[in-house]
Amino acid sequence: MRYYTGRGDGGETDTMGFGRISKGTQIANLLGDIDELNSAIGVSVTNTTDERVSGIMKTLQDKLFKAGADAASSGTNEGAKRITALDVRWLEEQTDDIGAKVPDLKKFVLPGGSTPSAYLHLARSIARRAERSAVSLSEKQRLNPNLLAFLNRASSLLFVCALYMNKKEGVEESHPTY
């Protein structure tokens, strides 16, 4: 089996809903951001010793594949997997559950602390970029509104998981000194 085709050498790629497109388009950027987010979450999983957080992150990775398929097929409605309100609700439930295990915040926190927390914060910031890419694309074409909400809630979940991992690891949050 070959792991390359050469079809993308000219700067184009295939999508389900848009056909062949430039890798420089907004949809290609969004798909790349979702892929990068999924990879960053994979790094988080390998550096997280908490089984609950690891399980949540693995489920989130699976849902991100559906999010990518949703975005890639937004040019058509044919047989695509779509992010639903249930996917958004799942993120909210996980965020509420983990969030109940961390102290209320009175200040901004600096990303970092323990290694698991730092990787979760990195994934959170990539989720925010994916959300910005989705919003930018939605200003030009119709996207599933649940996809936008999903990316927004994903960053919230990653944030509370980062806080939780610092708490579990016994690492105090650092705060800006401004």
Image (cartoon, rainbow, N blue to C red):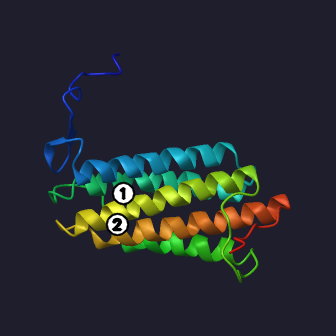
- In the rendered view, would you say 56 is above or below 13? below
User: Residue shown at 15%/57% (left/top)?
Assistant: 75
Q: Nearer the viewer, residue 102 or 66?
A: 102
The answer to whether residue 91 is left or right of residue 176 is left
Q: Earlier in the sequence, mark 1 or mark 2?
A: 1
Q: Amino acid at mark 1?
A: Ala
Dividing the picture into quadrants, the one containing residue 78 is bottom left
User: Residue under circle 1?
Assistant: 67
In which quadrant of the rendered image does the C terminus lie? bottom right
The image quadrant that residue 20 belongs to is top left
Q: Who's the residue at 50% across and 65% down the image?
A: 154
Is residue 23 left or right of 36 when viewed as pictured? left
Who's the residue at 73% across and 50% down the image? 115
* Location of mark 2 (residue): 147
Under circle 2, the secondary element is helix
Out of 178 and 22, give the one closest to the viewer. Answer: 178
